[in-house]
Image: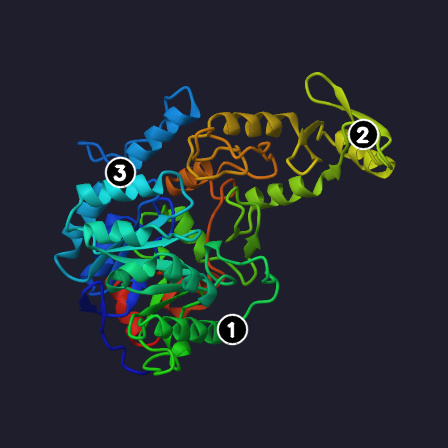
Amino acid sequence: MKTLKPIVISGREVLPLVEGGKGVSVSNGESSGAWAAANCVGTFSCVNPDTFGEDGKIIPQAYHGSTRSQRYEELIDYAIRGGIYQARIAHETSKGKGRIHLNVLWEAGGTERILRGVLEGAKGLVHGITCGAGLPYRVAEISAKYKVYYYPIVSSARAFNALWKRAYYKFGELLGGVVYEDPWLAGGHNGLSNSENYQEPQSPYPRVKDLRDVMRQCGQGETPIVMAGGVWYLRDWQDWIGNEELGPIAFQFGTRAILTRESPVCGAWKKKLLSLKDGDVFLNKFSPTGFYSSAVRNPFLKELEERNKRQVDYKRAEEGGHTAALPVGARARPVYLKPEDKARADGWIGEGFTEGLKTPDSTLIFVTPEKAAEILKDQQNCMGCLSACRFSNWAENEEGSTGKMADPRSFCIQKTLQDIAHGGELDNNLMFAGHNAYMFAKDPYYKNGFIPTVQQLVDRFLTGN
């Protein structure tokens, strides 16, 4: 194992080991502070972060506004207060060591306002902003105002080049690093483009080499690249360490960082990770963001798979081969299907999937009355957690709408991620994980259910294991 030498990240020499941000409440001030205290980079999630009351208990993120716009304002207020709180906890826990970053998703609701609010309220406590999920052009400008470093998450050299040419060239001195997130192996939302086949993974080395080549053209040859997604044993990445072709490299750990004593996820979640097998993590496109995402196969995802399979084309009037009438909705207005699709629909209705719900693509899906009621309720309770949501049709614009019909083939991501992060049932919620999560069961380090502290895990990384 080559010696892992410190590199400069966010203005300080630290070990090139980074905690992944991990979405809603799965990394927080306690976990990120522990990573920083180990002379690494800790990253707390600023996507709906938890806020605590004077009694030390989490304040539930309940929404009281009667409109989406009102609930959207509540969501932003929760996030700003929670982000400031987590930054303070991280700072205290770090004891002045390492670096503290916050993670935001550019396509999440209110991200720009939330970033400004947290950085204003936690001045000097945050050293870097990690930002992905889309093309975060404006994150550089925001970082410059508050004199912190920024770390865009990209999955290709092309994406970084677009960011640089449009905005980053103006703020190159604060580009702290570029996170390359493997779109086939990373957990959560992935940056697969329309030109890439989700079933044909590509090796990360040539893609990262392309990224470095573009960065050198931009004068960023010594700016670190953070390799994220698929990293387990550093011994498997020996060719990357000290590689002049790639330049300075750091390694980000998302899924593996969940299984530490400081990690805020519940014991049941940690236990589940220890039992996963190869193939249990599923790359899917059910997310209301429209992005691919990787999550643990469970009844929640199975229901979405089956819901999407019970789907047929329809027309509002007889047209071409669509000649078979089917009454749908409370008013039983007819739509027209192909005869063979009408036979399939009749079969699903006979199985209890009696509610036909229209999608934006002129199709019908068939669900039970209970599921239809749940979908409608979740759509009505939308609080604007995404800048544009397929499921509810909310958008951050004057109309408050994407202009499209709400899509019942998806789900309320805020609802499920909040629930699982706070002890909700694992089988009935979205459980993000990287594709190497099955390694927990194979790695002897976790034998007999052992869960390390962050410091113990960092020490383990330095051995190459």
**Disc 3 or 2, which lies upstream in sequence?**
3
Q: Where is residue 157 in the image (x, y as percent from the top left)?
A: 45, 67
Other residues around mark 1 within 10 Å, as few (<14) / some (14–19) / many (≥20): few
- Residue 365 located left or right of residue 290: right
- Residue occupied by mark 2: 336
Residue that badge 3 annotates: 80
Q: Which residue corresponds to the image point at 43% horizontal and 41% vertical from the top-left?
A: 417
In the picture of the structure, the residue carrying the numbered disc 1 is 203
Please tell me which residue is depicted at 28% across the width and 51% down the height of the picture. Answer: 141
How far from the left and from the top, in percent, is residue 422?
Answer: 37, 39
For the N terminus, which image quadrant?
bottom left
Gap in angstroms between the C-alphas marked 1 and 2: 47 Å
Q: Toward which corner of the image does residue 60 lie, by quadrant? A: top left
CA separation in Å, label 3 and label 2: 49 Å
Q: What residue type is labelled 1?
A: Ser
Q: Earlier in the sequence, mark 1 or mark 2?
A: 1
11 vs 181, left or right, is left
Q: What residue type is labelled 2?
A: Tyr
Residue 6 point in image, percent of width and height = 22, 74
In the rendering, which numbered label is found on residue 421?
none
Give the quarter of the image for residue 390: top right
Mark with earlier residue (3, 1): 3
Q: Nearer the viewer, residue 119 or 13?
A: 119
Element at label 2: strand
Q: Give the class, few, some or many, for how many residues have Cα within 10 Å of label 2's Cα (few <14, many ≥20).
A: many
Local crowd at mark 3 within 10 Å, few (<14), some, or many (≥20)?
A: many
Q: Is residue 302 left or right of residue 171?
A: right
Q: Does the image show residue 254? A: no
The residue lying toward the viewer, choosing from 215 and 463, is: 215
